[in-house]
Image (spheres, rainbow, N blue to C red):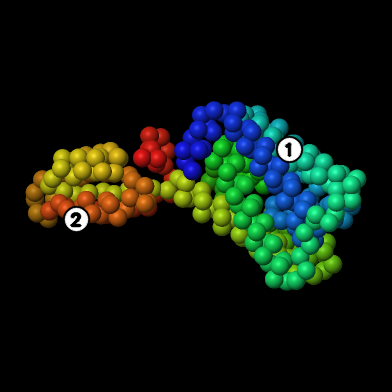
Amino acid sequence: MSIIFKLLNRFSWMTYIFISLIAAADAFVSVIFVYPNDFAPAGIHGFTTMIQHILGVSAGYTFLIVNIPMIVIAFFVLDRRYSLKNFLYVLFFSGLCVVFQNIMAAFDLYRWEYHAETSESYFVLAIGIGVFNGLAYTFTVLMGGSTGGTDILAALINHKRPAFNTVWVLFTINAGVAVMSYFVYGREYFPVAISVICSLMSGFISDTLLKGASSALKFEIVTSEPDEVAEQIMRELKHGCTRLDAHGMYSGQRRAVLICVVNPRQRTDFEKIIAAHKDTFAYCTPITRTYGLFDKVK
């Protein structure tokens, strides 16, 4: 997967095409699966969904109206490419929501809508929508954009106050969506539960995938055979090492410390290399994100 996103980011015009396709898929899923089943997904999209339910105004219009001011601010405050990608996503999602809804009304295609009939089918639907939203968010973020709404808001807050915990802002917005859905959808607890499940599943999927896409393992190796260990690591795992000279405080002997960052899937192979060398031990530290020259493809 990392190869694909490297190619997409290298040929930047391709990222705009893929972001547009994801936005189109999101609009289709919203019109066919979300709106007919009387529940609000997470974030600002949830608020626009409830406005559509109350006033009958397409969520496409309100989603665009809410996002435009934030995108304009982000254009001048944050990265311009990030803002353009967000604008493209919001524009395609909003526009196609309106188009799909008008086509269904003009040709009486409401039979295409999916209506959950039982509580079990509602829960399956919420999980499915959550998984889709998590995947859409992950792919757009890896291509340097986002799905708009609360994502832009979080980026603006983080830029202004880096130490501020934006998680609480997003949690407050999602909690507000869940609470409001109780009053919007007939004072029933069921839409609240569906909204929460959808939100949790979306967050779980995106968090898991983003951590997996950028995580690594850092090994620090204390050894009396630094050249041999480093040569084997570089030959078999295709990752380099950084060597530091060390002095054992207990034994008084000279040693070397090798620092090496590898992919999580290479852990077993790394442990085999360490076990093959006497007078060598290592400890491992998980890394949530890597920057700069670290090729995870090798």
Q: Quadrant of residue 18?
A: top right
Name the amino acid, label 2: Ala
Q: Is 197 on the left or on the right of 93, as rendered?
A: left
- The residue to which callout 1 is attached is 92
* Secondary structure of residue under mark 2: helix
Q: Give me the residue at 64% from left, 53% from top.
A: 132
| Residue 169 in view, yes or no | no
Q: Mark 2 or mark 1: name the one nearer the start of the chain.
A: 1
> Where does residue 16 sit, x and y in percent of width and height?
63, 32
Q: Quadrant of residue 78?
A: top right
- The residue to which callout 2 is attached is 275
Name the amino acid, label 1: Phe
Q: Are marks 2 and 1 in contact (CB under 8 Å)?
A: no
Q: Give me the residue at 75% from left, 71% from top.
A: 118
Taking 283 as reference, is 95 above or below it?
above
Q: Is 122 on the left or on the right of 57, as rendered?
A: left
Nearer to me, 278 or 268: 268
